[in-house]
Image: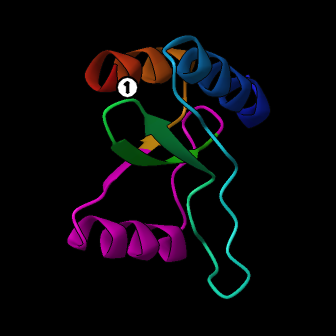
Amino acid sequence: MREKTIEQHLVRRVKEAGGMCPKFTSPNRRSVPDRIVLMPGGLIAFIELKAPKRKATAAQAREHDRLRALGFWVEVIDTKDGVERFMGEIA
């Protein structure tokens, strides 16, 4: 399964739950997560998507740690089941 397939599944599931899942880019920061999940009630999560069994790079992991230190929810998801687990937690 490709990363793109998992990403499309995440976007669809978030929309079905009434949220938004825009692509996250930052011109001045590298290694930011792929998507921001915005859910009703003000819930925010940053999602790094990977192909199955792939891991975040060291630079991505450092960026994830920075976001977590600020109190944000950051997940690395590499399967459709991972998307479903995340949706069970956030929805």
Quadrant (top left, top right, bottom left, bottom right) of the N terminus: top right
> At numbered mark 1, what does the secondary structure look like: helix, strand or loop?
helix
The residue that disc 1 covers is 86
Rendering coords of residue 22 (x, y %)? 66, 45
Q: Is residue 22 above or below residue 27?
A: above
Q: Magenta stretch? A: 51-75
Quadrant (top left, top right, bottom left, bottom right) of the C terminus: top left
The crowding category of the residue bearing disc 1, from other C-alpha atoms within 10 Å (few below 14, some 14 to 19, many at least 20), is some
Q: Is residue 77 left or right of residue 10?
A: left
Q: Is residue 34 above or below residue 14?
A: below
The colour scheme applied to this rendered structure is rainbow
Residue 88: image quadrant is top left
Residue 8: image quadrant is top right
Residue at the image point whose x is 72% and y is 35% from the top: 3
Residue at the image point whose x is 57% and y is 16% from the top: 13
Rendering coords of residue 21 (x, y %)? 61, 37
Residue at the image point whose x is 60% and y is 25% from the top: 10
Q: Is residue 3 left or right of residue 42?
A: right
The amino acid at mark 1 is Phe
Rendering coords of residue 25 (x, y %)? 70, 66
View extreme (front): residue: 41
Q: Is residue 73 magenta?
A: yes
Q: Nearer the viewer, residue 64 or 91?
A: 91
View extreme (bottom): residue: 28
Task: Please give the count of numbered marks on the rendered protein.
Answer: 1
Q: Is residue 65 left or right of residue 6?
A: left
Rendering coords of residue 77 (x, y %)? 49, 36
